[in-house]
Structure formats: structure tokens, C-alpha cells
Image (tube, grey):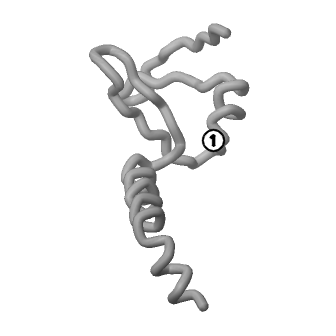
Amino acid sequence: MVLTSKTRVQGGSLVTSLPNEVTRRLGAAPGDALYWIEAEAGRFIVTTIDPQTLDALNHHEEIVSKYREVFQALAE
């Protein structure tokens, strides 16, 4: 699937509108932050998930996996 949008000048910025299908797939709503992560030169990944939050969740999962038995014992 290829979707397009056109850019326009707004103030000192270049802006574009996101197609409805893109916002639906991202789960984006008006006012949400979009994070632009450079994947390689000239290519970006756009997501609504804060990369710092994702990094913290990944570390959390590593810790829970490593100490699962300890957490289970503490929960009893």
C-alpha cells in the first residue's frame, strides 16, 4: 500500500496531514505526540510509542524474566 500527502508551509515549518488509514494504524488521535526515529539515512520510523517508555518496558521484561521465581515467592 502506498499513501501520499502533500507538504505545505505553516509559519516557519513544513507540515503535512496524515491520511486517515495511517492515523488508524498508528492509533493516533488529535494532540498525540508522534516520535520520529531515524532508521537509516533518509528513512524514519513514525510511532506513537515513546522510545524511552519502550526501552524501560524492555528492561522491565528482562528483569522480570531473570527474577521470575523471586517475584513469585514475594507475591505469596
Q: What element carries label 1?
A: loop
Q: In which quarter of the view is residue 11 placed?
A: top left
Q: Looking at the image, is 69 positioned above or below residue 41?
A: below
**Left or right position of 59 against 18:** left
**Left or right position of 65 against 75:** left
Mark 1 Cα shell of 10 Å, populated few (<14), some (14-19), many (≥20): some
Q: Which residue is drawn at 37% across and 17% down?
A: 43
Disc 1 residue type (three-letter): Ala
* Near-viewer residue (59 or 52): 59
Q: How many labels does the image show?
A: 1
Q: Looking at the image, is 69 positioned above or below residue 51?
A: below
Q: Looking at the image, is 10 positioned above or below residue 70?
A: above
**Left or right position of 10 against 21:** left
Residue 40 in percent (x, y) is at 31, 19
Give the residue pinned by disc 1.
28
Instruction: Point out the image quarter for the N terminus.
Output: top right
* Near-viewer residue (32 or 40): 40
Q: Which residue is drawn at 42% across and 71% down?
A: 67
Q: Which residue is drawn at 43% across and 20% down?
A: 9
Residue 39 in percent (x, y) is at 35, 24
Q: Which residue is drawn at 47% across and 63% down?
A: 65
Instruction: Point out the image quarter for the C terminus.
Output: bottom right
Residue 36 in percent (x, y) is at 40, 33
